[in-house]
Amino acid sequence: MTLSADEIAKILARGDLVVMRSDTVYGIFASALDKRAVEKLHSVRERDQKSGFIVLVDSVKTVVRLVRLSDEILKRLTVIWRGDSPTSVILPAEGLKETWLADTRESKPRICFRVPTDKKLQQLLVKTGPLCAPSANLPDEPPACNIAEAKEYFGDAVSLYIDGGGCDNAVPSRIITFENNRVKVIRPDGRNHPEDFIITRRRKLYKFAHFDEYPTCFQFDEWKTFLARNAPAKENHSLQGRFLQKGREIVVEIGAGSALFSVELARRHPKKLFIAVDIKSDRLYQGACAAAKLDLENIYFIRADIAQITEIIPPHSASEIWLTFPDPWPPKSDARHRLTAPRYLKLYREILARNVPAKIHFKTDNLSLFEWSLEQFTANGWKIEFITRDLHSSDAPDDAKITTSYEQKFIAQRLKINYARFH
């Protein structure tokens, strides 16, 4: 007879134990929030009471309700559990009220979580809440590969055995922890993972994977969540939240490419916050690497469409915008895609601060794009503060003369760089 998820949930809610397949091997399950059920699991499993169990949860949100996490670790967990490889993660048990779940063998209590890759098991966890789920075996014995072996281990001490077939070739979950926000593998699973990759001919895939691993890199939706989590209650989506000093200037590079330009600005101006936005994460990855090597803590990299800029940067909070070597989109029919087109100039006005002399900087090697853009800025109410058609021979500010990777190629070809600053 096949039991429904609701029926299994009722058995676990009584404090009983259940043996069934997890997303890896057979496990012996108990309700993690029921102290007596967990104590019973320790007894049946013949495990030291100080040892913790792997706790299965339905989502990262459940982990956040149980323990305190930094934004960096929260982001990493979201990425790690998005994949198809079962990965258990050991975390500090900070803020854990259910102290019986902690592993207390070391000076600082810890707890191990996993969001299973199996969708049916995730749905069961929605009904049951977190479940302790060690492998179905006794100390120094191999995990049970089928229900018969599990029954030999536990007999009548387990209320329900659910036959999920044989699992002779199943591999236990990978176990990792974090040291200084870097992944440390405790138990490997024999598979490649983004944080283990060596750069090969699959370089672009490597960059895409590692972009998500950097705590300073965000996909659009992740960035919105990050803003909401760090905003004061009365100022939702304000970048003047807990992770910013009040009054700190915000500088945005739009269409940032590799963002190495913003990285150099961030290095020169540690008191300002820099946000580099581009649609391609493999490009932004280069800037994230460079920022990490310099230990910069004042720059973020956002993968998003420029049309979403008013959701990325809260209204009237940026002091400067940099447009560095945008695509010229030569055909007239494509002019609306240019980053200096009127529809974008309107968006920039929405994010620039009102109470400071907010500015837009524009650099390009393309003279026709430069002249066209000057017309757009002027027609839309922007004032020119500085203009040159030969940047590196002018008296422009030093920041404007920081060379991007594209710019270095243009200079090598003896092309002149156009620059203007508007307010």
Image: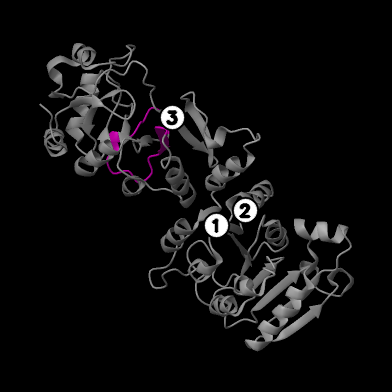
Residue stretch in magenta:
85-107
Distance between the Cα atoms at labels 1 and 3?
A: 29 Å
The answer to whether the residues at label 2 and label 1 have Cβ atoms under 8 Å apart is yes
Can you say whether 274 is above or below 1 in the image? below
Secondary structure beneath label 2: helix
Q: Position of residue 190 (x, y in %)?
A: 49, 23
| Location of the N terminus (image quadrant) | top left
Q: Position of residue 339 (x, y in %)?
A: 63, 71
Please name the residue that numbered disc 3 is placed on.
175
Question: Residue at (66%, 85%) from the top-left corner?
Answer: 382
The answer to whether the residues at label 2 and label 3 have Cβ atoms under 8 Å apart is no
Please name the residue that numbered disc 1 is placed on.
303
Question: Residue at (49%, 27%) from the top-left corner?
Answer: 191
Q: Position of residue 205 (x, y in %)?
A: 58, 41
Secondary structure beneath label 1: strand
Q: Which sits earlier in the primary sequence, circle 2 or circle 3?
A: 3
